[in-house]
Each structure stands twice: as C-alpha cells, then as structure tokens.
Amino acid sequence: MQGEGQAIGGRAMESMTGRLLVATPALKDPNFDRTVVLLVAHEPGGALGVVLNRATEVPVADVLGDWSELARHPAVLFEGGPVQPDSAICLARMRHPVQRVKGFHQVSGAVGTLDLSVDPERLRENLGAIRVFAGYSGWGAGQVEQEIEDGSWFVLDALPGDAFVERPDDLWPMVLRRQGGMMAAVAHFPADVALN
C-alpha cells in the first residue's frame, strides 16, 4: 500500500509508488543514463516503473490505433525500460481523480495505469491524456533500495504532468532544476563526463 511502512533488510521502508527515480551522473547502466522513471509499484518483493523520457519514433496509431487520439503529444511509443519490450504499459491522467473507472489503477492522484483492453470510447470523457510505454523497468526485492544507497538514483516527488510532458528530452534537467540548490546544479552536469 502506498505510504505504508514496510521492512526491507531489517529497515523500515516507505513505499515509493508514485515517486520519481532520477538517474544521477554516477549511474553506470546505459539503459538508464539521464532517465526519469515513474515508479508505478513498489512493494517488499520489488519495484516496477516506466522511463518517462525515452520517446521512440513509432506512432501510437501504428500499434494501438483506437488509442492514438488520446495520446499526449508526442503521440509515439516510449521505451519504458529494458524488461519485456514487447509488452505495453499505459499511463493515464484522469480528469476526475476520485472517480472510479474500470481498467484504471491509481498510482498517485489523477495518474495511474490503464488497461488497454478496455474500449477507449468508454473512457474518452474521463481521460485527460495517455502515454504508452513498450517494456518496463523492474527491480527485485531490495535492489532499487541498494541502487539508491549506492548513489545511482535521486528519489523525488512527481508532479501530475511529469509523465505527459511535450518535450520528454527536457524532463531530466527540468526535474532536477525545480529542486533548487545543489540538485539544480546537477542538471548542468556534462553528458560526456565519466564519474569514477
């Protein structure tokens, strides 16, 4: 459950569901270089998220024609992560977050995952925007916590529009800059400098 304390490796842990993992310059995995990941699930058994800032050139209309009108610009598929790239996860922002809608599973506020087998016409008036991700990012029990402890990720609060920005390439520096202080300075870290 979101916000509920859980024990991981003997330590109490708050669920990070709905929060952002923002790659630090120290992160060595090229799959996650300068990525912003929205955690859609975080439980004692592991975590699951989608990379918000890796747009492809494949139009949503080419893969999910009926959903393309609801896709936020750019209306393309996004690389959600390296796990199961042939699967799809859909994030949606509802117009009325408290209303229960079949096929919508709340992550945080008005943002959640959406079952793509539901008829989009039935949801049209309730949906503000969708974004479709090919694949996802996954971590086993304690793995994401260890990566955070090792300095690979900043854990930051998400804003409702983060998953639906029109210029996804700008999301990494944008999220860091809005933190202010030293965190904002990281947004200007050169991409081609390796940390040892």
Image: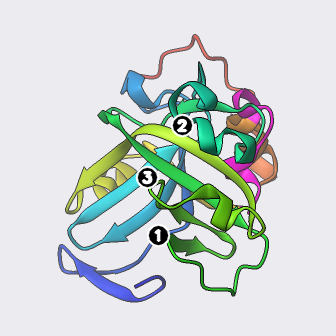
Q: Position of residue 77 (x, y in %)?
A: 56, 31
Picture quadrant of residue 187: top right
Name the secondary structure under disc 2: loop
Report whether residue 23 is seen: no
Task: Work out whether residue 137 or residue 62 is closer to the camera in this orientation and state it.
Answer: 62
Name the secondary structure under disc 1: loop
> Which amino acid does the dot numbered 3 rest on?
Gly
Per the image, is 70 magenta?
no
Name the secondary structure under disc 3: strand
Give the magenta-colored segment's residue range.
Answer: 159-170
Per the image, is 160 magenta?
yes
Quadrant placement of the C terminus: top left
Q: Position of residue 67 (x, y in %)?
A: 62, 45
**Given this view, does label 1 or label 3 mark the residue nearer the observer?**
3
Q: Which residue is mark 1?
A: 16
Which residue is painted at 45% across and 31% down in the image? 32
Asked if residue 47 lies left or right of residue 70, the reply is left
Task: Work out whether residue 113 or residue 150 is closer to the camera in this orientation and state it.
Answer: 113
> Which amino acid does the dot numbered 1 rest on?
Met
Q: Position of residue 168 (x, y in %)?
A: 71, 33
